[in-house]
Each structure stands twice: as C-alpha cells, then as structure tokens.
Amino acid sequence: MTTLASRSPAASFTGSPARFGDLLAAEWIKVRSLRSTPWTIALTLVFVLGASAVATLTDRTASSGPADFRPFDAYPAAGYWTLMLIAACMGALTVVSEYSSGLIRTTTVAVPARGSVVLAKAAVTATVWTAVGTAASAGSFLVYVAVLGGHGAAVPVTHPGVLRALAASALLAPVCALVGLGLGVLLRHAAATMVTSVFTLLMLPTMFAESDRWSADVKHTLVSAAWNRLVQTWEPDPASLGYTATVTGSWIVYALWPLVTVALAVPAVRRRDV
C-alpha cells in the first residue's frame, strides 16, 4: 500500500527559494502595472523640460556667446528640485505602499529573505529613475541648445563642464529615489517618509550657508548642494563665496547617500516584524 505524503502549498512554495532574477521580475511587474507610474514620469519630464525652456528663454538676451554657458538655463533649480521631490516620493512609495495595503505580508511569506526583496526594489528603482533622469538631463540640454543655438550662445556637449553637468543631472533622480526608498523601509509610514524626504533633500540645505566652515561642511554633505556644485561649470571664487565644495567630494556625496540609506534598510527589514 502506497502512502502519499501530503504537502501544503506554502511548504511547496517556500521549499524552492526565489532567485534574485525572479525578484527583479516581480518588482518590475509591480512598477509597470501601476497606471500612475507612466503618467507621473511623463508629467515630471514635461515639467522639467518646460522649466528649462522658460529659464533659457528668459535668459536668452543676456547670453552673448558660447563662453557664457549658464547651467541654470539648462538645469534650473525649479525643474530639478521638482525632479528630486517626485523621484524621492516615488522611490518611497515602492515600499510604503506595500506596508499601507498589507501586501508586504504576502511578499515576505513568498520570499522570507527580506533583504533580497529590498535589494531587488532598489535595483529596479535605480534602473527606472536612471532612465528618467537621463531623459530629463539630455532633454534639458537639447532644449537649451534649441533655444540659444540660433543666437550663437549655445555650447556643444564637449564644452568644459557640460558632460559633468549632464551626468550629475541624470544621476540626481536615481540618487533621490533610492534615498526615498531607504527612508520608506526605515519609517514604513507614507506621511512620515514623504516629510522626511522633502526636509532632508530640499529644506535642510537652505538652513546652512557657506560663509562659516561648520555650516559649509554640513551643507556640502547634502545631495542638492552636491548637485549644485557638479552642474557649476566655473571655478568658484573662495574669496567671495566662502567655503566651497569640491567636485570629488560632491561625487562622493552622490554615492554615499543611496548606499547608506539602502545599507541601513536591509538589516532593519530583517530584524523587525512587518
């Protein structure tokens, strides 16, 4: 007589751990299945490119030649602060939306390796927002060239500092999205995460000036200050501006913020209940 060993569906499901590629595919499905995602990205790009067009048109009469490249034409603060805000909020929503809906319980039952889930979310978020940031950065520069090209005031992409400004503006979106994601894992509440993201990325830098050493040091560790320095194509005058950030230090800030927040999120999600 043969006895059939019964096995619960949960046991069968958890018996074969999900591969990281499967987690990436699942997170990508979550992102693209939301109807709000493409609309949010499209409206963000429209606003960023529109802000660049308005800034360039406004400053067109003041531009006298290619040597007068003004990064605040192609990359105005209004457009890119908005990009920072939306990228951080969307990065946070990839996590806090699951906590608020209760889907996180299903996710952790299906994949007990919570750290791998966070890393998969981070990988997909970084990929999506790198693409968005690249489109915004390249589009902003093309708008700048289109508006000022007929006046002989546009500069080529090979102009000193332009490639750095392009790269810094493109990477600003994934940096902020990953910061938002990390804060979302740590805080787990939508309102708290949004407020903390906005304060950290946008409001906190305005509280510090570069006239004092300690204030300048704090400001230079923040993402928006690093972006401002990287898109700046001229060398600052220490005598008039006080303590200034370095290009190398600004790139380090770009790297450390997403790395630190995600690194804190991975062990945090492993230690606590959902």
Image: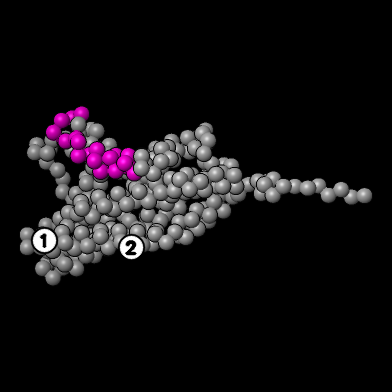
Q: Quadrant of residue 154?
A: bottom left
List the single residue furthest toward the right: 1
Task: State yes or no: discs 1 and 2 in contact (Cβ < 8 Å).
Answer: no
Q: Which residue is at the front of the view, 150 or 73?
A: 73
Q: Main secondary structure of the magenta part?
A: helix
- The answer to whether residue 90 is left or right of residue 246 is right
Is 2 contained in the magenta span? no
Q: Across the whole image, how many numbered discs are drawn on residues?
A: 2
Give the percent coordinates (x, y) of residue 66.
Answer: 13, 61
**Residue tagged 2:** 42
* 44 on left or right of 28: left
Mark 1 to mark 2 CA distance (whole Å):
24 Å
Residue 263 in view (yes/no): no
Secondary element at image label 2:
helix
- Give the residue at mark 1: 58
Which one is in front in this view, the residue at disc 1 or the one at disc 2? 2
Label for residue 11? none
Q: Secondary structure at mark 1?
A: helix
Q: Residues within 10 Å of mark 2 (few under 14, many from 20)?
A: few
Q: Position of residue 39 (x, y in %)?
A: 36, 62
Query: Which residue occupies 23% across, 36% down?
Result: 219
Residue 272 is situated, as x and y percent measured from the top left of the image, at 51, 34
Q: Relative to 216, say whether 24 is above or below.
A: below
Question: Which segment did they paint magenta?
Answer: 194-214
Q: Quadrant of residue 252?
A: top left
